[in-house]
Image (spheres, helix red, strand yellow):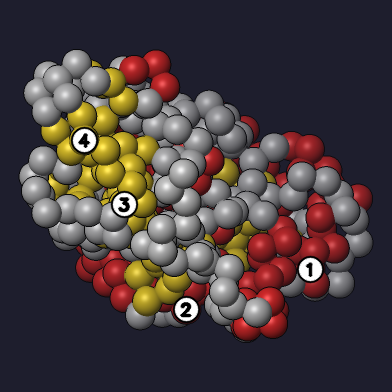
Amino acid sequence: MARASGKIRPIAVYPISFLRILPLMPRPLVAITHVSAMQANLAAARKAVPGARTWAVVKADAYGHGLSHAMRAFETADGLSLVEFDRAARLRELGWQKPIMMMQGMYDVSDIEHLVRDDLQPVIHHVEQCRMLEITPINRPLVVHLKINTGMNRLGFMPSQVGEIYHRLVSMPSVRSVSLMTHFANADSNGTMPDVAAQIAAFAHATAGLDAEVSLSNSAATLLQRQIRGDWIRPGVMLYGGAPGMQSALSLGLQPAMTLQSRVIATQSLRAGDSVGYGSLFIADQPMRIGIVACGYADGYPRLASTGTPVLLNGVRTRLLGRVSMDMLAIDLSPLPDADVGCEVTLWGEGLPIDEVAAHAGTIGYELMCGIAARVRREVRD
Ligand SMILES: *Cc1c(COP(=O)(O)O)cnc(C)c1O
């Protein structure tokens, strides 16, 4: 028997003590946050609505980009806006001194203690929250935002209630001032119901005669509805380089704030008729080489992405093949005949808009950004 021919070097030649000091090699998958892109996107938002102040929206861990990095990138914003109380407290710990808006307000009367301690400004969208404010003694009165339901039917008071609720809030000892806000259902498209014009008209009608600051525009309205005037804007996804509507982020002048990157960890040579992965969804119609990439749906890559979803291989566009697995996916190596194990693969980010990948999976960039799994290594670049 031809064993131990000497050609293959045994691996276990290091003493254990030496092995221990070898660095742990991580999986090659990494999600990179680009701070300078977030800064540039914030500048683009402010330029789009000159004179308005900006609530930079940082809910969901800054749309998956990391709260502390976002805070640094958005240091020139006038306020930060989110929905999670523990994250708001974290912003104060990290040194954020400007306003913080809680876009769903308090969920329970016990949240009022946190509002006061961390100087947070709640959105008041339901009469139950008015009651909470009325029954709780507060030593430092709060700035609150009255939310108006102008047609989206998610949060907010009906236009007919607004006058009464506004005056009720203004007269509470626990309230220092009241601002007015609403949220658009369709700022990224025209001709749908309820459209932006109808929502604006409802807002104007509901708030006529009330002397208060106004905040209206999300990213889509900020970029695409320049006719809208408010004292504040509330951009979210655009700050991270996501396109809010059908137009591409690039054409809107936005830079991607996240790059999801990995490497080829194996290659296979297929013959015509060979299939790839679970369900054999891709079948080669001619001989071809494919690469297996360390990235799967357990990392946050969408399992619904199918053959043809764009991927960058050493910066060159190629395509996903077959079904995405839990820890890996397959790509076509044909555009780069020399491609091999170790080649760099960009799943989205610089050079490949996240919204384009999302569209192939029947979703939106927002969901992909927010869905990066905890096991994925993180890196930050300035
Ligand atoms: C999330 C959110 C925003 C930001 O929306 P984008 O579409 O990400 O710009 C603005 N306002 C409210 C109330 C939100 O919940």
Q: Nearer the viewer, mark 1 or mark 4?
A: 4
Determine whether the residue tagged by mark 3 lies in a helix, strand or loop: strand
Residue at 31 percent across and 75 percent down: it is 36
The disc at residue 264 is 3
**What residue type is disc 4 on?**
Ser
Does dot 2 land on a helix, a strand or a loop?
helix
Residue beneath disc 4? 269
Name the residue type under label 3: Val
Q: Which is nearer the N-term, disc 1 or disc 3? A: 1
Q: Earlier in the sequence, mark 2 or mark 3?
A: 2
> Could you say which quadrant of the image residue 349 lies in?
bottom left
Q: Which residue is mark 2?
A: 72
SS of the residue under disc 1: helix
Q: Residue at x 86, y 49 (%)?
A: 109
Q: Nearer the viewer, mark 4 or mark 3?
A: 4
* Mark 1–mark 3 CB contact (< 8 Å): no
Looking at the rendered image, the disc whose residue lies closer to the viewer, 1 or 2, is 2
Q: Which comes sooner in the sequence, label 1 or label 4?
A: 1
Q: Could you tell me residue 155's position as x and y percent?
A: 59, 35
Q: Relative to the observer, which residue lies in front, 146 or 298?
A: 298
Q: Name above or below for residue 281 compared with residue 259.
A: above
Could you tell me if the residues under marks 1 and 4 are in contact, i.e. CB atoms within 8 Å? no
Work out how far the residue at label 2 is from the one at label 3, CA to CA, in angstroms: 33 Å
Residue 180 x/y as whole percent: 52, 51
Residue 91 is situated, as x and y percent measured from the top left of the image, at 63, 72
**Amino acid at the residue labelled 2:** Arg
